[in-house]
Amino acid sequence: MKGVKVLILGLLMVFGLSLIGCSSSSQKASSSGEAQDIKAIKDRGVLRVGVKVDVPKFGYRDPKTNKIDGFEIDIARAIAKKILGDENKIEFQAVNAKTRGPLLDSGQVDIVAATFTITEERKQSYNFSDPYFTDGVGLLVKKDSGIKDLKGLNGKKIGVAQSATSKKAIQEEADKLGIKVSFLEFSTYPEIKAALDSGRIDCFSVDGAILNGYLDGSTVILDERFSPQNYGIASKKGNDALAKLVNDTIKEMKDSGEIDNLIKKWGIK
């Protein structure tokens, strides 16, 4: 009988330890609760978003008012409203093609909404939402340059943004045509436009919708488009609940027609 009691006692202890283990694991799940990545944003009370400030119609800082506005700014505000119930609970951080990834990696921003092209390589490093806009790499040249297409840039210099996909897209097309082009890389789009104006480069290449913001009386955008560019909202790997919430928001905005309305609002072509 004593042996039976010992056996029962042992079984109860094992069962009790199992319960503790289950309880502890469920507590861990509950402490992550609505997920630590979302909870951290709610506790902070503000969504930190990396945006462009030099791309008219997408993300642009008005030098007169210092206000940042544009298509992607409106999308970011919709995400802030989804998380925090108020589209104004948002903090913008200026980024460019070279800095947006590192700022996500370091946690200085929660998401990036900055004409960030989705590629298979980038998907290894970041979570991306479904595309909310599709464009193609274009070419902006001076009207009096006589350049009509990419072939006309044989032996010429093309200005591109650092770490952007434009350089690879144009190089691949140039290789197909058997022409030689060289590249100069810049930190910002205004720098590329200034280099075009001054004659340091013969062409400014980036996505067509971005080029539209730099079109003026002395320049023209060529008809050709290369390598479809799908823009997505990026978040840090591991922040999977945030990535899902962002993607759900983009899907809702697409399904409701809100994305199309914003494209019309900002006159994006």
Image (cartoon, rainbow, N blue to C red):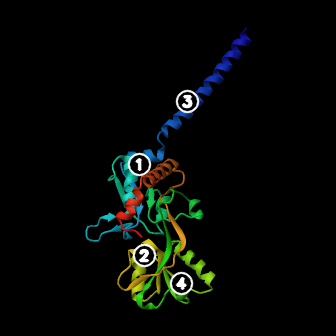
Question: Are the two marked residues, 4 and 1, in contact with CB atoms closer than 8 angstroms?
Answer: no
The quadrant of the picture occupied by the N terminus is: top right
Secondary structure under badge 4? Answer: helix
Residue 153 pos. (x, y %)? 53, 87
Relative to 248, say whether 125 is above or below.
below
Q: Residue at x 37, y 47 (%)?
A: 84
Report the residue marked by disc 3: 23
**Residue 213 occupies quadrant:** bottom left
Mark 4 or mark 2, earlier in chain: 4
**Residue 51 occupies quadrant:** bottom left
Question: Are the two marked residues, 2 and 1, in contact with CB atoms closer than 8 angstroms?
Answer: no
Report the residue marked by disc 2: 211
Q: Residue at x 54, y 33 (%)?
A: 26
Secondary structure under badge 3? Answer: helix
Q: CA distance from mark 1 to mark 3?
A: 27 Å
Q: Mark 2 or mark 1: which is in front?
A: 2
